[in-house]
C-alpha cells in the first residue's frame, strides 16, 4: 500500500539563515513544529575548517536544549573553495580532510547522514581524470564515516555546478565505482528537473538507497520557496509515495538572496505548500 509523505518528515534547516544567528534559526524551527534539522555547515554557524571540539559541543547543547536532533550534516561544497575532485593536489587534499573532519562532527552531533557531492574537474581536461580523483576521495570518506557509524549520501549537481555527477545515469555510475554499501542517494528536485529525470526513475534505479530529499521549487532551476517556481509538488510527493520513501525532506532555500531577509516566512510558505499537497493526496486516496 502506498504511503504518502507526511509533514513530520520535513526537517528544519539553517539554509537561508546565514545572516542570522544559529540560535534564532533553531528557535524558529521549534516554533514551526520541526523536531529534526539539516545543518548546513556555513560560517559562522558551524564552519568545519575553524570549529573546535568545544564549539561542536556548544552546537550539540543548543540542539538538545530545544529538543532537536540532526538528520543530516551538509558541508558547503559548491560555492566555497571545497572540491574533492580538484586537479590541484593541495585543494583536493584539504577538501578530503574537511570531509573527514565533518564525519567526526556528524558522530559528535549524532547525525546519521553526511551529505556529499562529487566535486568538479577542470573544464579543459578529460573528465575521467577528475572522475578518478572523486571516486578515490569518496571511497576514503565513506569508509571513515562508516567506521564512525555515519552513512553518506551523494547528490547530483546541475551541469553549471559540476561536470561529474549531474544526472541519474552519472550518479548510478559513481555509486557503483565507489562501491560502498552504505553510500546512499539524495534527490534534489531542482537538479532532478533540470536533468529531466523523474522520481520514478530514481526509484527504479536506487530503491531504498534514496535516503534524503532536498525538496525545493524552481523554474526549473533556482532554489525557490514552493509557489515561487513552477515545479509540480503534488506529482513529486505522489512519486515519493510510490517509492514508499520514509526519510527526511529539507527545503534548501537560496534563490536570489531575498529569503535570507525573512527566512522564517519562506520556510512557512514551504511548509504550507507541503501540507496542502499532502492533504490533497490523502483526500484523493480515500
Image (cartoon, rainbow, N blue to C red):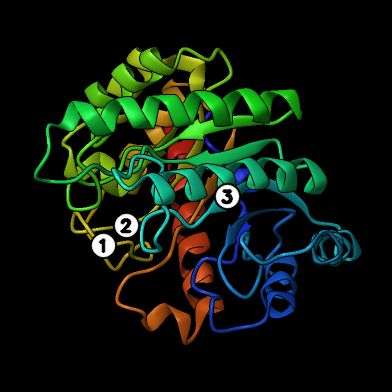
Residue visible at 62% across and 43% down in the picture: 9
Q: Is residue 58 left or right of residue 84?
A: right
Q: Which residue is mark 1?
A: 222
Q: Is residue 127 above or below residue 91?
A: above
Label 3 close to label 1 by CB (< 8 Å): no
Res. 2 visible in picture: no
Mark sitting earlier along the chain (1/2): 2
Q: Nearer the viewer, mark 2 or mark 3?
A: 3
Q: Is residue 102 left or right of residue 170?
A: right
Q: Given the current orientation, which residue lies at the most extreme bottom position? A: 261
Q: Nearer the viewer, residue 100 or 231?
A: 100
| Quadrant of res 87 | top left
* Picture disc at residue 98: 3
Describe the element under mark 2 as helix, strand or loop.
loop
Q: Position of residue 158 (x, y in %)?
A: 23, 47
Label 1 close to label 2 by CB (< 8 Å): yes
Q: CA distance from mark 1 to mark 2?
A: 7 Å
Describe the element under mark 1 as helix, strand or loop.
loop
Residue visible at 38% across and 12% down in the picture: 176
Residue visible at 52% across and 23% down in the picture: 183
Q: Nearer the viewer, mark 1 or mark 2?
A: 1
Q: Which residue is mark 2?
A: 217
| Quadrant of res 238 | top left
Amino acid at each position: 500500500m502506498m504511503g504518502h509523505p507526511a509533514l513530520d518528515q520535513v526537517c528544519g534547516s539553517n539554509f537561508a539563515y546565514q545572516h542570522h544567528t544559529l540560535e534564532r534559526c533553531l528557535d524558529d524551527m521549534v516554533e514551526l513544529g520541526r523536531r529534526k534539522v539539516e545543518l548546513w555547515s556555513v560560517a559562522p554557524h558551524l564552519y568545519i575548517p575553524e570549529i573546535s571540539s568545544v564549539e561542536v559541543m556548544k552546537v550539540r547543547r543548543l540542539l538538545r536544549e530545544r529538543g532537536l536532533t540532526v538528520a543530516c550534516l551538509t558541508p558547503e561544497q559548491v560555492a566555497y573553495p571545497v572540491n574533492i575532485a580538484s586537479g590541484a593536489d593541495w585543494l583536493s587534499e584539504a577538501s578530503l580532510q574537511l570531509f573527514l573532519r565533518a564525519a567526526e562532527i556528524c558522530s559528535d552531533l549524532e547525525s546519521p547522514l553526511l551529505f556529499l557531492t562529487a566535486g568538479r574537474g577542470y573544464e579543459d581536461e578529460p573528465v575521467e581524470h577528475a572522475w578518478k580523483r572523486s571516486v578515490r576521495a569518496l571511497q576514503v570518506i565513506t569508509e571513515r564515516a562508516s567506521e564512525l557509524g555515519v552513512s553518506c549520501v551523494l547528490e547530483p549537481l546541475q551541469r553549471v555546478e559540476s561536470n561529474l555527477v549531474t544526472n541519474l545515469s552519472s550518479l548510478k555510475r559513481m555509486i557503483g565505482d565507489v562501491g560502498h554499501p552504505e553510500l546512499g542517494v539524495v534527490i534534489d528536485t531542482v537538479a532532478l528537473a533540470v536533468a529531466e529525470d523523474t522520481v520514478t526513475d530514481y526509484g527504479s534505479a536506487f530503491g531504498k538507497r534514496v535516503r534524503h530529499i532536498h525538496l525545493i521549487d524552481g523554474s526549473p532551476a533556482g532554489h525557490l520557496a514552493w509557489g515561487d517556481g513552477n515545479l509540480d509538488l503534488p506529482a513529486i510527493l505522489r512519486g515519493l509515495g510510490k517509492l514508499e520513501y520514509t526519510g527526511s525532506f529539507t527545503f534548501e532555500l537560496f534563490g536570489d538572496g531575498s529569503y535570507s531577509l525573512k527566512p522564517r516566512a519562506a520556510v512557512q510558505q514551504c511548509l504550507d505548500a507541503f501540507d496542502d499537497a499532502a492533504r490533497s493526496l490523502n483526500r484523493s486516496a480515500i
